Amino acid sequence: MSKYAPRVEQMDISGIREVFEGASEDDINLGIGQPDFPTPEHIRSAALSAVEEGLVDSYTGNKGTLGLREAISEKYERDNGLSIDPQNIIATSGASEALHIAIEAHVRHGGEVIIPDPGFVAYEQLAVLAGGVPKPVELRDDLTLDPATVEAAITEETDLFIVNSPANPTGAVQSKADMREFARIADEYDVVCLVDEVYEHIIFEGEHHSPMEFAATDNVVQVNACSKSYSMTGWRLGWVTASDERTERMLRVHQYVQACASAPAQYAAEAALKGPQDPVKEMVSAFENRRDVLLDGLEDIGLETPRPKGAFYAMPKVPDGWAETVLENGVIVVPGEVFGDRGEGYARLSYATNVEALKDALETMKSVTRAIPK
């Protein structure tokens, strides 16, 4: 008799968390994907008011409060030109749960899940947890996902492929043409395109587009959250949207693993989506400035870096042993292989920290790079 479930035995603790939790208070942390801005005051106030008014003492509906789902629907109309029925939205405990229930609802035992490599660490592990088979595919030189590569990887066993734009860990932004192609692939091959859009508003170059804009079938499932755009990582509020039939299947998973998202967080998220968007614009402007400081510094050091157009990550190509040595010298970075086999030879740097810390980190990186034999 097995002591543990075999699928869990195949899973690993996130390499990001291992690096983060091994850091000391004195280290410069470029390892964590978390905005260093406070949650805007009007969002906090909405949550406090809901608590004081006694609105959060009970479960909400499984899908979330109607007010929040209407706010999400309005957001899609306003920002994406999409008409999304509030009944087809499930509020979740962050984008993490949204990804989990989407994969659980759509992947058969042994079904293939095509994921970007390098890509967000949760994709592979959630596929394994669902009994699926992760199928990593390489990226272009600019670290975007090529629709042709995805299409070539599809077999009779493929259930789902994942698109992430702007992307973690690369900062890459997919083009409108790419997104149109991903929609075509989902339609033509009758596989699910799961699109992770949590960094949607953090774009410096280009525009955000979703495969859902172009899909002729219901084969696109969207995941999003307030975590990054509104600096609400700790509130754990995300959502997933899809067709009636797909939402119903995801709800079956959600109601047993979570019941409902946190009630205070739902009221906070409603205020975030309906309230002033100036804090988002200010944050994005700060991130763009930090990106430019980091890219200039990496170029000066001589580290080739595909230009990130969104999110708050850069992935320079680094020599062997570089990430480990930088870590030993008090700058927290994440080795690229944490994000997949094809991440080897890269490191992920998060610039969700202040400019002075970035400049200090760059000085350390310069010293380390010069000390490593060519």
Image (cartoon, helix red, strand yellow):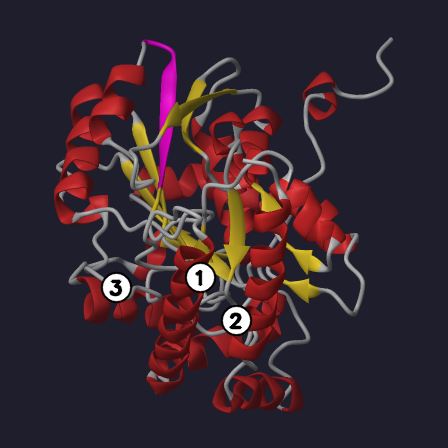
Give me the C-alpha separation between circle 2 and circle 3.
Answer: 17 Å
- Over which residues does the magenta segment extend? 156-163
Q: Residue at x 50, y 85 (%)?
A: 40
Q: Position of residue 277 (x, y in %)?
A: 34, 82
The numbered disc on residue 266 is: 2
First in sequence, mark 3 or 1: give its number: 3
Q: Are marks 3 and 1 in contact (CB under 8 Å)?
A: no
Secondary structure under tag 2 reads: helix
Residue 233 located within the stretch drawn in magenta: no
Three-letter code, disc 3: Tyr
* Circle 3 residue: 76
First in sequence, mark 2 or 1: give its number: 2
Residue 157 located within the stretch drawn in magenta: yes
Q: Residue at x 60, y 69 (%)?
A: 235
51 sits left or right of 266 in the view: right
Q: Residues within 10 Å of mark 2 (few under 14, many from 20)?
A: many
- The residue closer to the viewer here, 135 or 223, is 135
119 sits left or right of 144 in the view: right
Residue 23, quarter of picture = bottom right
Q: Position of residue 334 (x, y in %)?
A: 61, 47
Vertical placement of residue 102 versus 200, above or below: above
Residue 62: in sight, yes or no? no
Q: Residue at x 39, y 61 (%)?
A: 295
Secondary structure under tag 1 reads: loop
- The residue closer to the viewer here, 274 or 30, is 30
| Magenta stretch: helix, strand or loop mostly | strand
**Tag in front: 3 or 1:** 1
Give me the C-alpha separation between circle 3 and circle 1.
Answer: 23 Å
Q: Position of residue 136 (x, y in %)?
A: 44, 24
Vertical placement of residue 157 versus 5, above or below: above
* Circle 1 residue: 312
Q: Residues within 10 Å of mark 3 (few under 14, many from 20)?
A: some
